[in-house]
């Protein structure tokens, strides 16, 4: 089984439009990976909460079967946890999750 998790921490929307979102989408649609998780971390969480275009891009990922998770510690710091949850994003503490995925052999990409 091939699984990848992608940590999205940059607030640069061009990086996500041109790189991270297309890769996540195609990984599922083209069957490159069996499971894809996108972890929103830090500034990216604030972008999702405030930017309608970014919210629409997240919804497209969700439709393709990509799991979207946000770091609760970061989203609490930015005051956006509730907004992210209302967008259907799983908000949780991710330190242990990331550690377990690494130990379980997941591939990792960071943007």
Image (cartoon, grey):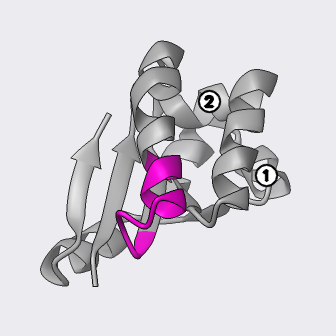
Q: Residue at x 58, y 37 (%)?
A: 45
Q: Residue at x 41, y 21 (%)?
A: 15
Tell me the SS state at disc 1: helix
Mark 1, other Cα within 10 Å: few <14 / some 14–19 / many ≥20: some
Identify the image quadrant of residue 67: bottom right
Above/below status of 55 relative to 10:
below
Q: Secondary structure at mark 2?
A: helix
Q: Is residue 51 visible?
A: no
Question: Looking at the picture, how far across and down is residue 16, in whole percent?
Answer: 48, 27
48 versus 23 height, above or below:
above
Residue 92, percent across and down?
55, 66
> Label 2 neighbourhood size at 10 Å, few (<14), some (14-19), many (20+)?
many
Residue at the disc numbered 2 = 46
Q: Which residues are magenta?
A: 24-35
The answer to whether residue 24 shows anywhere in this view is yes
Foreground residue, 75 or 40?
Answer: 40
Identify which residue is drawn at 62% across, 26% down. 47
Q: Is residue 32 left or right of residue 49?
A: left
* Residue 98 in picture, x, y percent from top left: 29, 67
Labels in figure, total: 2
Residue 39 on the magenta span: no
| 51 is higher (above) or lower (below) than 89 | above
**Alpha carbon separation for disc pair 2 and 1:** 12 Å
Q: Is residue 38 left or right of residue 62?
A: left
**Side (left or right) of 88 relative to 90:** right
Residue lying farthest to the right in this orientation: 86
The tag earlier along the polypeptide, 2 or 1, is 2
User: Looking at the picture, how far across and down is residue 31, in whole percent?
Assistant: 43, 67
| Relative horizontal placement of residue 53, taking residue 86 as reference (left or right) | left
Residue matched to label 1: 82
């Amino acid at each position: 089984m091939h699984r990848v998790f992608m940590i999205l921490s940059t607030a640069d929307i061009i990086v996500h439009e041109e790189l991270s979102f297309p890769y996540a989408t195609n990984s599922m649609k083209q069957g490159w990976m069996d499971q894809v998780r996108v972890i929103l971390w830090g500034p990216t969480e604030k972008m999702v909460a405030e930017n309608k275009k970014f919210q629409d891009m997240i919804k497209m990922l969700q439709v393709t079967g990509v799991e979207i998770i946000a770091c609760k510690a970061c989203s609490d710091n930015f005051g956006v946890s509730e907004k992210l949850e209302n967008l259907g994003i799983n908000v949780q503490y991710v330190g242990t999750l990331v550690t377990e995925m690494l130990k379980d052999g997941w591939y990792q990409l960071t943007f």
